[in-house]
Image (cartoon, rainbow, N blue to C red):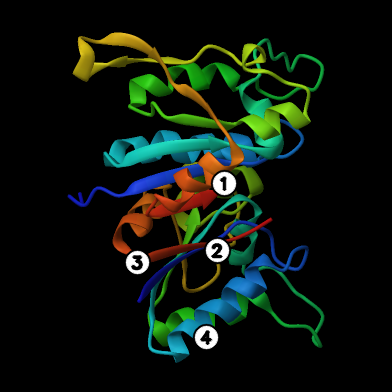
Amino acid sequence: MSETVKKFLYVNRKAPYGTIYALEALEVVLIGAAFDQDVSMAFLDDGVFQLVKGQSTDGIGVKNFSPTFRALGDYEVTKLFVEQESLDERGLTADDLQEITYEDEDDDWEEKPSIRIVSRSEMSDVMADQDVVLSF
Amino acid sequence: MKFGIVVSEGPYTHQASDTAFNFAKAALENGHEVPRVFFYHDGVNVGTRLSIPPQDERNIQQQWTALGKEHNIDLVICIAAAQRRGLLDENEANRQGKDANNIADGFRISGLGQLIEMGIQTDRLMTFGD
């Protein structure tokens, strides 16, 4: 396996259901975790709906994959950037999102939040800082 | 420069695979390298040899197969996305007990690791999608 460590950003722009983009994006993130790269995820536009808590898909006959986001910490995916403006535009606040945490091995395994709410201009800085951006 | 290319929308429905093809061709003509193209989401449908567009239309699969052969491009179809959508090579058809396979010449089916590896090994990763 390559020893190069690159900064990967997975950009999630679509609602969790209605199209397959969100589910197949998450499949890439989980497989990609095996490559030991520096991984971040971005949630903007309708992508912020992916993290909303209390999702139920009983009525639409598709799998509810939202619990998987809470397992990302175990895959060392610990940076989930969520755009404030996208939340605002959809009448959402940080309180509407599920709690996602990771255990920080550099800080005595203290449990810390993975979700970081950032402004649109901060999000552009996050993107500019990456080597590889995969957009879904 | 080494370009990695992702095609994430289906052929004919969406322009993504055409634009990706034109980009790859132009990059190669200008001395750049395109070692791999990764087909994901509905983009996997580019790789079926059973599509028959009208004769006066471009044949997207054949365009890719020809470009791939000419420039030794690794045309990879994501296995997870392909299985959902009925794209199978001979091995997978046998393994799954299916009575047919449909992968076009020059394409191969492999895992998502090939996409990550492409991101690591190329200088720029370009996504063509929606």
Whether labels 3 and 1 share one chain: yes
Q: Residue at x 48, y 36 (%)?
A: A41
Q: Where does the image place residue A118, in percent across and percent down from the top left?
A: 54, 32
- Left/right placement of residue A95 relative to residue B115 reads right
Q: Which mark is residue B123?
A: 3
Residue bearing the label numbered 1: B81
Residue bearing the label numbered 4: B26
- Left/right placement of residue B22 relative to residue A81 reads right
Looking at the rendering, which quadrant does residue A83 occupy?
top right
Q: Residue at x 46, y 43 (%)?
A: A126
Whether labels 2 and 4 share one chain: yes
Q: Where does the image place residue A81, in percent across and percent down from the top left?
A: 51, 32
Please give the chain letter of the residue carrying mark 2. Answer: B
Please give the chain letter of the residue carrying mark 4. Answer: B
One can see residue A129 in this view: yes
Q: Amino acid at mark 4?
A: Ala
One can see residue B94 in this view: no
Residue bearing the label numbered 2: B103
Is the residue under label 1 in contact with that under label 3 (CB below 8 Å)? no
Distance in Å between CA atoms under marks 2 and 4 = 26 Å
Q: Amino acid at mark 3?
A: Asp
**Foreground residue, A49 or B63?**
A49
Q: Where does the image place residue B21, in percent across and percent down from the top left?
A: 58, 76
Earlier sequence position, callout 1 versus callout 2:
1
Please give the chain letter of the residue carrying mark 1. Answer: B
Distance in Å between CA atoms under marks 3 and 4 = 17 Å
Q: Amino acid at mark 2?
A: Ile
